[in-house]
Image (tube, grey):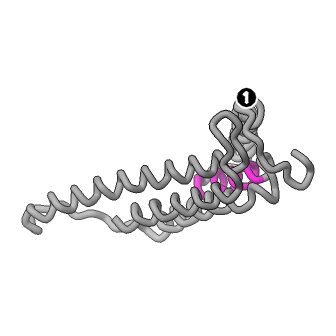
Amino acid sequence: MISAAVWVAFGVAVAIGGIGLGFGTWAAPASGFVPTLAGVALAAIGAAVFHQEWRFAREAARVPRTARPETPSPTAAERWRVAAAAGAVLAYGLLLEPLGLVLTTVLVLGVLFRFVGGLGWLATVTATAAGTGFSYALFARWLKVPFPPGPWGS
């Protein structure tokens, strides 16, 4: 339940940061539109997971301890991956304005694919290029979401 509560808090923080960039309107979204919605989605998913875990814990409390199956604890590597993924999402929110959409997406996806996902370099470069191209085409071109230009005006 603690991890779900952390995701709720993290989602709220991302949403507040997104609002600080300016939400705009549904018809004319501003730079904070996507981060705000992403933060709301994170918080909502975290709240749903929290509720599910709370219900499971309540049901498990009714079962005698000897009848419960052993639940393995996460390894240090698994905990590191979760922390790194959360840090990458936080970095995305913090770096989007100074670095712009393209550079921030390349950096964050590269870190996630290579170091969190454990992909090889070729797969990392390919997936990062595809993901960045897709997000740019979807948000900047098709949906016309105005993003900060970044240092090179991209």
Report the front residue among 1 and 112.
1
Q: Residue at x 49, y 52 (%)?
A: 42
Q: Is residue 40 visible?
A: yes
Residue bearing mark 1? 142
Left/right of residue 13 with respect to residue 31 in the rendered view: left
Residue 97's place in the image compared with 137, above or below, is below
Where does the N terminus fall, quadrant-wise? bottom left
Q: Residue at x 17, y 61 (%)?
A: 58
Helix, strand or loop under label 1: helix
Residue 107 lies, in percent from the top left, at 75, 54
Q: Is residue 115 visible?
A: no
Left/right of residue 75 with respect to residue 131 in the rendered view: left
Amino acid, disc 1: Trp
Q: Residue at x 70, y 62 (%)?
A: 94
Which residues are drawn in magenta? 104-117
Residue 31's place in the image compared with 53, above or below, is above
Q: Quadrant of residue 20?
A: bottom right
Residue 41 lies, in percent from the top left, at 50, 48
Residue 30 lies, in percent from the top left, at 72, 45
Report the front residue among 68 and 93.
93
Q: Residues within 10 Å of mark 1 (few under 14, many from 20)?
A: few
Residue 151's place in the image compared with 34, above or below, is below
Residue 73 lies, in percent from the top left, at 34, 68
Q: Is residue 68 magenta?
A: no
